[in-house]
Amino acid sequence: MTATAQQQLCQRWRKTLQDGRATLAARYTADRNGRAYLQAHSALVDGVIRSAWDVLGLGQRAALVAVGGYGRGQLFPHSDIDLLLLLPSATCDSLSSFVEDFIGAMWDIGLDVGHSVRTISECLQEAAKDITVATTLLENRMLAGNITLFHQLNSAVERNRDPLPFLEGKLLEQQQRHSKHYGLGSNLEPNIKESPGGLRDLHTILWISKAIGVGQTWDSLISNDILTASEARLLKYSERQLERIRIDLHLAAKRREDRLIFDLQNTVATMSGLSDDDARRASEQLMQTFYKASKNVSQLNGILLPNLRARYVCTVPRLTQDLDEHFYSVNCMLGIRDPDIFEKQPSTILSAFLHIQRHGLRGMAPRTLRALWHARRQINERFRRDPHNRALFMQFFKEPVGLTRTLRRMNLYGVLGKYLPAFGKIIGQMQHDLFHVYTVDEHILMVVRNLRRFAVPAFNHEYPLLSRLIDEFERPEVLYIAGLFHDIAKGRGGDHSQLGMADIRQFCEAHGMSAADTDLAEWLVAQHLTMSSVAQKQDIYDPQVVQEFAANVGDLRHLVALYILTVADIRGTSPKVWNAWKAKLLEDLFQATRRKLQQGGEVDLDLELAERKKAAQAILRLNAVPDGVEQALWQHVDSIYFLRHEAREIAWHARVLNRSVDTQTPIVRARLSEDKEGIELIVYAADQPDLFVRICAFLGGANYSIADAKIHTTRHGYALDTFHVFLPEHHDGDYRDLINFIEFELAANLQRQEPIRMPPPGRLSRHLKHFPIQPQVLIRADDKQRHYVLSIVSGDRPGLLAKIAKVLSDYHVNVDAAKIMTLGGRVEDSFLLSLPSSHDDKLLLALENDLINALRI
């Protein structure tokens, strides 16, 4: 055949493929029948490949075999076409050119082909070395060519199959795959195929079932008593859900894409017929659909694989111990004597988890797990009202160890959501707020895990103060229950803190908690965001701020409980949100409030001022600074300066500036911060227009992130500004080089007074691009009516603070203090402002509008 003729044929086959795929996609969009699409797509590709084989292939000299997912007859829109060209012998060199031409034609047609060319013996050798090859050979289908050769392959594979190594290998492979995908299916962009609870977990069940000879379909597993009819229905339903999402992903991306990435979540949600409502985005509804299907798969995967292994590998119990009349431990797993015990005595469902927790068991034996899973329907309103069951549930929180594992296990097997219906509603619920990287249920369990970690002696070195506080806290189960309920009302619309108060009060009263503990738990749910907001948005070194926070807290038990819960909550949002700077702010607020509560009475500003100066002088003397040197600077600052700065900052300022209080050259000094996670920066210069803008623009241009800014103007007209700065995540070099760079370059920048160069806008994160935060700007007078407080909520982006500073400068607004709080990609900044004396409501409105416009650009 001439090259031109072959090219024309490939173009014709290509068009057949394109037209067929378009028809299938349109039909699928109309009927949403994913399984029919996969089978029809496989058949379409089969026809094209067979036509090409008849014209360009090797005829009866070889066999063309579909393997892998294509061999299963489940071909997703842009999946690989896995082919095996089976040759009769390794000496078929004369066929190599035909093979090359055929595979090249496949690519010309538009098929993404993955191929191997082997003899039967080579297939067996590769399968023995690589479990992936052994797996693909389990799923093969004759396409064209020598069918005798195909049958010989399957006979040889069957004769040489060793089920036990295959079984153990696939179990290890699944474990490694789960670990690779973070060990949980609920990360922000899950892989529909590979994540825990994904399609690959279903494939693993069927692969192992076929390898050990008990069936290769869900129906055959029912016939062989591996799977019950109800389990099969749920598996099939979840499989269909996952298949539809994966098909939608491929069609939306127009390529092979198995991750439910931010870029496509809204599109896939729309394809699924979902739309935004008052409480949740369409994408959040889609993600919850995925997580629920994924959880079903994980549950049944956890039940079926141990049962399959037990069916094939008859292990003799090594250690058996009676626990009570219903339960015993076998090989450190929980066994049951009567498989119907959960149905006959439903309270034993909770007893089973309590035995695992108390005796440190690894989990449930296969028979126990399956019996428990089927008995979950017994957890109804009558079950929840039973005083004995309520006492058992409360006991989980009072046991010295194992609470986190118990709650996670109960959540995995659907028991926790049954016992607490409010918890069941938030299972798999995504939070597109740019800093939570877990679903709501996973976040809640992470918070409880953090609370428990504070109480475990082995982890006392991580947070010594918190460990000591929780060790001294009476009835710490109140904290764990508050952690379990603090976000339980998310997704209902409205303030989840307020809605959650009713849930936790009902729970506490129903479970016999004292009135005082019930009130505390309810208060913690209502206030669980308060302490982090005060620490990160207000000046916690202002005695009045501490006074107001102490009045809200009321007593030491409430303060300790809120502090412990706040740290556990922030640490449970994302590994990237928590840092030593936030830890220091919260601890400083806690210590100041504790002192205030212990002292009682109103704030004595004169006493606070004297103590702050005394502490600063003590630090100066420790640094060998002579007596009285500090007065060179202190004579030019007022009381507000001392109240807004820590003693260590005041001492540093005095030590650095005592000989330069009247300098005409800008002074910039930097040092490693106390928490060792950033840099503290002093900028001292004769006051000048746009100073704050210049500093922000310089730091933004160097990719430094400002966490805190304290702006002060001395009596003799000098700006004394202090910043806490975070460095870029992947910065090179040591801190000394970075400090030298900042000190020299920023001072030179301020000295030259060149036109301000705003930092480039940079690129938005993909998350923020697809789930934008509507900018919010609020300006209000402070409590003393002396200043104004500017509150900003926005998505984070490079140069954002410099933009804000530029707008304020254009309106001749002075920034007296700034709190820059970044939670993932969400910014919540607060500024203390001094406005021009001639300002009016129209100016404030115009300023708000210009700030919003700047945040949108």
Image (cartoon, rainbow, N blue to C red):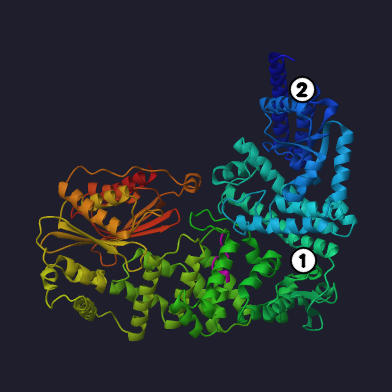
Q: Circles 1 and 2: CB distance less than 8 Å? A: no
Q: Residue at x 22, y 81 (%)?
A: 607
Q: Nearer the viewer, residue 233 or 702?
A: 702
Point out residue 796 in the picture as x, y percentages from the top left corner.
Answer: 41, 51
Q: Is residue 485 magenta?
A: yes
Question: Mark 1: which amino acid?
Answer: Trp
Residue that numbered label 2 is attached to: 56
Circle nearer the viewer, 1 or 2: 2
Q: Quadrant of residue 444?
A: bottom right
Q: Quadrant of residue 476?
A: bottom right
N-terminal of the pair, mark 1 or mark 2, is 2
Determine whether 742 is above or below 15 in the image.
below
Q: What crowding class fits label 2: few (fewer than 14 Cα within 10 Å), some (14-19), or many (20 or more)?
A: some
Q: Which residues are magenta?
A: 484-490
Q: Residue at x 73, y 58 (%)?
A: 171
Instruction: Say how many tags the image has.
Output: 2
Question: Mark 2: which amino acid?
Answer: Leu
Q: What crowding class fits label 1: few (fewer than 14 Cα within 10 Å), some (14-19), or many (20 or more)?
A: some
Q: Nearer the viewer, residue 632 or 418?
A: 632
Point out residue 304 in the picture as x, y percentages from the top left corner.
Answer: 79, 60
Q: Nearer the viewer, residue 317 or 674?
A: 317
Magenta-drawn stretch, dominant element (helix, strand or loop): loop
For the C terminus, the quadrant is: top left
Determine whether 99 is above or below 755 in the image.
above
Determine whether 855 is above or below 106 in the image.
below
Residue that numbered label 1 is attached to: 373
Alpha carbon distance from label 1 to label 2: 54 Å
Point out residue 358 in the picture as x, y percentages from the top left corner.
Answer: 68, 81
